[in-house]
Amino acid sequence: MRYEIRVEGHLSEPLARAFPELGHVVMAGQTVLFGPVEDAAHLYGLLARCQSLGLRVVEIRQLPEGHGPGGPWTPCPCPSPVVGEPVARRGA
């Protein structure tokens, strides 16, 4: 499964390195972390890592297979889901 995790603000390179298994891109006042997530435990671990680093998660969504680095997916700068189905969303 591939996921996109949007966090508020621009992650510094040292913070981005806390997620070595994910790619990241900064856009529209947010940082989008994206990549493969093995299972629910891995996803919860990523969210726990966000919490321990003081990051505010804005949105999480599962991406269709074949999207992401090496595929046709490009992060959308808009806050509404365009690719995939929303899994969780705060502040909506």
Image (cartoon, grey):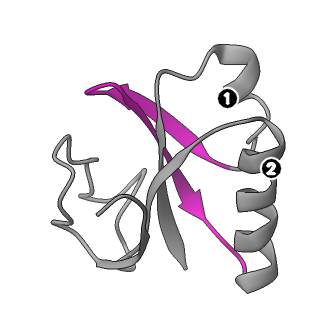
Residue at the location (20% across, 40% down)? Answer: 77
Name the disc covering residue 47, or none.
Answer: none
- The first of marks 1 and 2 along the sequence is 1
On whether residue 27 falls in the magenta region, the answer is: yes
Q: Amino acid at mark 1?
A: Ala
Q: Quadrant of residue 17?
A: top right
Q: Quadrant of residue 20?
A: top right
Q: Report crowding for label 1: few under 14, some 14 to 19, many 20 or more residues within 10 A (C-alpha).
A: some
Q: Label 1 vs label 2: CA separation?
A: 11 Å
Image quarter in which the N terminus is found: bottom right
In the image, which residues are magenta? 22-38
Predominant secondary structure, magenta span: strand
- Measured as percent of width and height from the top left, residue 23 is found at 55, 41
Q: Quadrant of residue 64?
A: bottom left
Q: Secondary structure at mark 1?
A: helix
Q: How many marks?
A: 2
Name the disc covering residue 16, or none.
Answer: 1
Task: Give the answer, above or below, for where 82 lies relative to 68.
Answer: below
- Measured as percent of width and height from the top left, residue 25 is found at 42, 31
Question: Disc 2 designates what residue?
Answer: 49
Q: Nearer the viewer, mark 1 or mark 2?
A: 2
Task: Give the answer, above or below, for where 79 lies relative to 29.
Answer: below
Q: Amino acid at mark 2?
A: Arg
